[in-house]
Amino acid sequence: MTDINKQKVVLAYSGGLDTSYCVAYLKHEQELEVHTALVNTGGFEKSELKMLKEKALKLGAASHKTFDLVEDFYQKSVKYLIFGNVLKNDTYPLSVSAERAFQAMEIANYANQIDADYVAHGSTGAGNDQIRFDMVFQILAPEAEILSPIRDQTLSREQEMEYLSKHGIKLEWDDAKYSINKGLWGTSVGGAETLTSHLPLPETAWPNSLSKKQPLDVTLEFEEGEIKGLDGSHMVPVSAIQTLTSLADQYAIGRDIHVGDTIIGIKGRVGFEASAALILIKAHHTLEKHVLSKWQQYWKGQLAEWYGMLLHEGQYLEPLMRDIETFMEQMQRNVSGKVHLTLSPYRFQINGIESDNDLMNSGFGDYGELNKSWSGEDAKGFATILSNQMKIYNTVHNNHD
Amino acid sequence: MTDINKQKVVLAYSGGLDTSYCVAYLKHEQELEVHTALVNTGGFEKSELKMLKEKALKLGAASHKTFDLVEDFYQKSVKYLIFGNVLKNDTYPLSVSAERAFQAMEIANYANQIDADYVAHGSTGAGNDQIRFDMVFQILAPEAEILSPIRDQTLSREQEMEYLSKHGIKLEWDDAKYSINKGLWGTSVGGAETLTSHLPLPETAWPNSLSKKQPLDVTLEFEEGEIKGLDGSHMVPVSAIQTLTSLADQYAIGRDIHVGDTIIGIKGRVGFEASAALILIKAHHTLEKHVLSKWQQYWKGQLAEWYGMLLHEGQYLEPLMRDIETFMEQMQRNVSGKVHLTLSPYRFQINGIESDNDLMNSGFGDYGELNKSWSGEDAKGFATILSNQMKIYNTVHNNHD
Amino acid sequence: MTDINKQKVVLAYSGGLDTSYCVAYLKHEQELEVHTALVNTGGFEKSELKMLKEKALKLGAASHKTFDLVEDFYQKSVKYLIFGNVLKNDTYPLSVSAERAFQAMEIANYANQIDADYVAHGSTGAGNDQIRFDMVFQILAPEAEILSPIRDQTLSREQEMEYLSKHGIKLEWDDAKYSINKGLWGTSVGGAETLTSHLPLPETAWPNSLSKKQPLDVTLEFEEGEIKGLDGSHMVPVSAIQTLTSLADQYAIGRDIHVGDTIIGIKGRVGFEASAALILIKAHHTLEKHVLSKWQQYWKGQLAEWYGMLLHEGQYLEPLMRDIETFMEQMQRNVSGKVHLTLSPYRFQINGIESDNDLMNSGFGDYGELNKSWSGEDAKGFATILSNQMKIYNTVHNNHD
Amino acid sequence: MTDINKQKVVLAYSGGLDTSYCVAYLKHEQELEVHTALVNTGGFEKSELKMLKEKALKLGAASHKTFDLVEDFYQKSVKYLIFGNVLKNDTYPLSVSAERAFQAMEIANYANQIDADYVAHGSTGAGNDQIRFDMVFQILAPEAEILSPIRDQTLSREQEMEYLSKHGIKLEWDDAKYSINKGLWGTSVGGAETLTSHLPLPETAWPNSLSKKQPLDVTLEFEEGEIKGLDGSHMVPVSAIQTLTSLADQYAIGRDIHVGDTIIGIKGRVGFEASAALILIKAHHTLEKHVLSKWQQYWKGQLAEWYGMLLHEGQYLEPLMRDIETFMEQMQRNVSGKVHLTLSPYRFQINGIESDNDLMNSGFGDYGELNKSWSGEDAKGFATILSNQMKIYNTVHNNHD
């Protein structure tokens, strides 16, 4: 299928209308040999992947490659998002944005490997994804020129379908009302209402609907910050996440709307449903409150916020990211134990934790109770000394005010 | 009632067993003239206040004074907690801890005013409250010596009741299973399960129970960061908070358990129910996401976290607090608009906002849509330049790695 | 001089070779009516300004305008750089970068005022200045298109001189070895050695040379953070800065080399000489150490670092900047007093301060001395309580390690 | 020498009047068996150590132990102070405060080892040292009770000498005008002028005086953040520090006065001379500016500031400290290269650096010069996109202002 006279392009392909248009456009108008590549970070079933390959070839791709990156995505990203309890703007678990960097890196490496002259993506010019793709492509595949037909041409969906049709491709395309992205760490839902500031998404727009009402108790087991078990069964983290997702999705847990600042300076609003992400983060966070010191929690929070922001903004390759990962990993040495919780329709609650490293109930002294490790006199002395600077300030300022 | 030969003590009085014991103890054992003072920050009805006064006098107080501080508490504290979206450890709206400083300040001023020789509180030696009282007393009433009988003697409830009984005081005391504190900004519930790490509070421990199931849409109106209206009615903030509380308490909204580091270094765990606080903070925060710049949000978050921490830890009088208040107030100049939300059993959701200052949907450029304010070329250039440092880093480290 | 058929451009003009070339180029090649504007932020004498006007007109400018912005530059920028003790990378007082924003804003306003079709600057494509100009122009004069001939054409100095010569302009141009920028807040020196990583600037490259060796004692007087007096004479801040500069430049004080990250991601290295800036910042900082609380200093440091970074990176118009100014201004309420220092060849030392707001030596308690405000027992209690969390941590981890 | 009926105390002994008094007091008044321990962190010569041992035994110590901790102090503390470029309040390299924690830890371990009933120090009640000793003793030797005779008794120097004399001990004591502490990382000088806010230390108070005037070029070599060579000779870090100290002390480099907030809330002022510390920190920092990314520098600065603060405040055992050490160590992987500098009387200057990891001059693009890695168009696009949020803000606020 490879034509030695033709220049090669690797296209980040998702099977949607935009990237399908790109296949045809890059082949027919740019006269390139199009190698489509699809990176699965948890959103696709095997059968879908097979179907998408067939579709790509039918659209004119010279070759199609599927990369299964779920484990890698967990190890290099989701793990740290849990370590950091990362919720962008206190809300969004980065369900989609975290995946893009990994997809882009795999595509860039593939382009290098087959000596592609070009590397292409199907993002528009008004979102975060274009920057995430562009940056990773530029850094890891600097020899390949970047093509972005959708951004350059700003066509409507109708125009794209018409173009494909002209080239003999007649396919069913999803209703365009919502743009949906699914991965291991959640599903995002954008379009219609999310383009306004004041409207919520209707019930029908959400990927899952309520199918179970009876509350369910669940116990999660963490080992050094990683989820390694659920209700007594030991599992690798990816399986635990997937199992928890299946359980919690029945309760339609984990919906919210994220309003954030895009990398390019405009505000964006997007719905998401991410039951496992929200549960794991709150469970992990609660465990940390018991086993980390006050200032450990504070500083991990600080660094994790930037970890999330830089990842969201396409800067996974910033060297600071590796330093933050090391810092968070080191701190997770004590984050082991069980977290008990209850799933209910549309919500969950954390019931409590058990950990050998619990700094509460250590036999040392109990909150609000009699204690043997310090006296009332010690507490008085503490308050006296801690007041010193404010007392001096008040004295100085009353004297000459 | 005042005996000129006797030394005076002002006692921070709440009407519970501990402070009731203190009245009797300070009078009979310390032979002081006891002036009880109760500071209402929103937890007491008028009838209760009257009853508590009678009780104090019956216990032997030489005088009793009630201070109604709800408006003051809002103006000097709750307002800033909303401006700052303050949730301690991402969870707790400081329902009780914020009030203590105000109660302590009022008590200290009163002690100064009546030239008290002593000022007393009923806190134990194992919590935050003792430090909050001690510090404010030391700073504002440095001439009055601090007494803290409960901390010093570490008696059981039975011993306290026996002592009162011996002095002829036979009253009904609440079941001691839970210690409950109520104020404008929420109710805390501590005891039994909260003394463990693993148990949740039972349904019966919560102050409110579910009494309404039909979801209810509510619209809040903010003016420069302050809540000034609800469903079209203009209200002063305290009324709006109280009205919202009545509505949301019917849905049993706002329950959670806070696990935190006390000022004295031990971990503490406490349940709370704070419907209005949680709703107002999430509503206000959502509005801010639309009207503030990315870095305004970031830095207000940073300073607000410390505002909450210092307030929680009894350092309301730290001069930095006034600087942070000024900073937050200045930033609220644009935080005006409506927030639409829906109350449901045990939960609420923010539906959207409307604001003249909305930086989204400003006609400038829309997220994910075609735009006229910048081109695809601009975005490419942006990504290119933003990649520069990482490209250099990769180049340098590939060359000699 | 105005031709109604011609389109107008306002050019940010400095009188150097690059902007001189721009005058001729914009006139002859772009056929625009060129209105030169020079914004003085303290680097030019009156006679120079007159000469530069004549030069601009000789080069073909349709009009020339001089804006004297020294006072405005102080009030809107230098003042806050002192409040914040701003030293980029702990070294550089932003001698040049702070001025650019003000020059750009004045140029943009002027362009709006005369309804210019274009606004132009003479920056290259490899530094910070282009971004500073571009951003301010885009934000404040969005209707005017930006022209940047030097960035677009990348000519050598020889080519520029030849072009001017071709158009009959034969002028003496400075030796190009160093590019020198002078303003109220210091002088930068770039070129030759600063383009390497390892070479220092030679003695001859520095603007001032040592002319006085006898040490000189100086007393500075601050009022609410602003420099208002020197050696007993009351002065407005701009005069005090200029007077201090004259004194300290004789000692060749304030030289260093700044190595920093440019906005565009590459590293830059530049020499600077900024005697008054370095002295005022260290003096002001020392005074603050005496009058501010520990956490006031910490948080002002945090915000000031960002104030400096955003200003350096051309983001003076970010709304957060106004919030930080308010915060710093509020905190300066106590920063009044005298600072004593000594100037010596190539260096200065702070000798001490005097202030009514001094929190040291307040009669409260002295460092290392006996005291009456707290006892040894209080200090013991303080240490005991402050050890609590670490004691618990050690206990928990020794028990099961 | 050990009396099985007597209780044992380990005393942190320095040989000064205060700790000498403690030996006699603990022996005669408390009737304890006194085991003196001196921990050398670089301030003592061998001959001094011998003499101090004899003195301790003469004073009545049952045994005396000398711990040589210089290498350990470097490995566990000074190394990280260099990694972090730690200057407290932008001034003080923690010359003394860093040592105290290590001395206290060694003393605590020794007390555990010999099953001491008590552990004692000679600090007053008005400084930082008491808290540093108390905290480490409480955490690491919780079974030993802490004694602090100087803090408890608040005697004058005359009273102490009289007491010793009464017990037959007649020794020469240093003039008490200045309290001097010497260690590997510098010497502190407190007393007389430093107890005021306005006076500098006189020339005679400084430990070293100017003995060399001819400027000297020096080259330092760093490997992964550690100083490993000087002027071409490879050295272990402790030797390099000592060698640099000998060279630089001849120029009387590294003097300044630190004004800081003590742990106990009062302000303290102390002179210090720390030539090697100030030179190494500025040299290391300059190297980092060349090899670390912008955000790596920012975040290391943030964490290092806390590392210094917690160490200064006696919290070396806070678990966060280990996490920060890991973070800083990880980031030092690229901090290798040479730093060239010149020593002159009372000052030094950094001339430049050489490093394989230099991100400047990488052949990628030069500051202010033509470049090939991006175009003027890219820079324009960057500025356009970076302006977006401010443009929107200005549009929104001009429309309805």
Image (spheres, coloured by chain):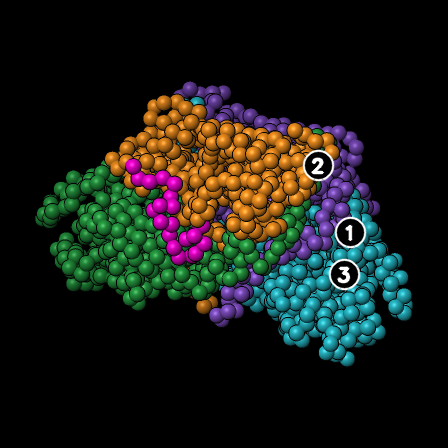
Chain colours: A cyan, B purple, C orange, D green
Label 3 – label 1 distance at C-alpha: 15 Å
Q: Where is residue B58 in the image (x, y as percent from the top left)?
A: 56, 29
Is the residue under label 2 in contact with that under label 1 (CB below 8 Å)? no
Q: Which portion, as a residue range, is magenta?
A: C190-211
Are discs 1 and 2 located on one and the same chain? no
Of all chains, the one bearing label 1 is B
Q: How many marks on residues?
A: 3
Pointer 1 local density, CA inside 10 Å: few below 14, some 14–19, many at least 20: some
> Would you name the residue on which mark 1 appears?
B369
> Would you name the residue on which mark 2 appears?
C7
Q: Is residue A24 above or below residue A128?
A: below
Label 3 – label 2 distance at C-alpha: 35 Å
Of all chains, the one bearing label 2 is C
> Would you name the residue on which mark 3 appears?
A149
The amino acid marked with disc number 1 is Glu
Q: Position of residue B32 (x, y in %)?
A: 43, 28
Mark 3 or mark 2, which is nearer to you? 2
The amino acid marked with disc number 2 is Gln
Q: Which of D21 and C132 is in front in this view?
A: C132
Mark 3 or mark 1, which is nearer to you? 3
Q: Residue at 52% x, 24% y: name it.
A: B63
